[in-house]
Amino acid sequence: MRRSLTDNVITLKSPAQIANLRSANRIVAEVLATLREAAAPGMSTMDLENVAMDVCRKYKVRPAFLGLYGFPRSLCISINEEIVHGIPSTKRILKEGDLVSVDYGVVYEGMYGDAAISFGIGRMDPETERLMKVTEESLYRGIEQAREGNRLPAISRAVQQHVEDAGFSVIRDFVGHGVGVAPHEPPQIPNYVGRATPNTRLRVGMTMALEPMVSTGHWAIVVLDDGWTAVTKDGSLAAHFEHSIVITNDGPEILSVLG
């Protein structure tokens, strides 16, 4: 989500709500795995949109992003220097060596599942492979800090340190967020530590979507004329990984996995 300064009340989820979130996120995980398997040179990004819609129809769930804030498709699919919110199109054709980032969500029994992955098309440049590896690792470093009693900056700091130790940049205009009965709930979860980072104490029952977006160059962005697609200002590559999680007495549980 795009960073803003608004923050409201954080709600803790009931066991029944968490069960529905787990179901919603398993469907999201299946959609993302299906898309990664299906993507190939010569396909359009609209072809992948259609694949995602087929999985939604299979489970009779509503795609969360279709119409959200006016977004015109169910899938956010971004290529190479595009960071997030790319719009599927019959004119965007995948080719060998492309770095593809897919962000997806569904609504199941009133609860929102949300996750994202990046993957390559065919043979990839070693630096692009390293970008994806570091970005995914930074997500897990952040998740590891999502524990009862920790404060939110521990997540942000873990992500930022891993990314910057690798020589990459955290995209600062987009943040993770709470998730559950709404697609974007408080708290906002920056992927770096700054003056505006909330000092929220983490509690059992909090549900969050952590989503580092990482660039090989500078973190500054530009939004294209379509009003949605965010790209790196310097044209450098970007990757994006996201999991929805719940904080339990035993630590963080990742919800957006195949089960």
Image (cartoon, rainbow, N blue to C red):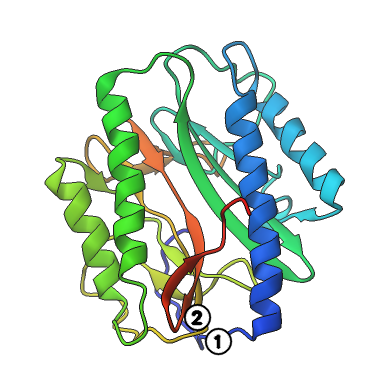
- Residue 206's tag is 2
Q: Which residue is mark 1?
A: 12
Tell me residue 66's x, y (percent): 73, 50
**Image point (39%, 74%), residue name:** 5
Does 27 sit left or right of 131 as displayed?
right
Does 168 sit left or right of 249 as displayed?
left
Q: Nearer the viewer, residue 184 or 248?
A: 248
Classify mark 1: residues with Cα within 10 Å, few (<14), some (14-19) or many (20+). some
Q: Residue 218, located in which quarter of the rendered image?
A: top left
Q: Residue 129, located in which quarter of the rendered image?
A: top left
SS class, disc 1 = loop
Q: Is residue 184 above or below residue 99?
A: below
SS class, disc 2 = loop
Residue 148 visible? The answer is yes
Q: Amino acid at mark 1?
A: Leu
Tell me residue 256's x, y (percent): 57, 56
**Image point (56%, 62%), residue name:** 255
The numbered mark, 1 or 2, whose residue comes first in the sequence reads: 1
**Image point (66%, 68%), residue name:** 21
Q: Are marks 1 and 2 in contact (CB under 8 Å)?
A: yes
Q: Amino acid at mark 2?
A: Met
Tell me residue 12's x, y (percent): 55, 87
Tell me residue 116's x, y (percent): 52, 47
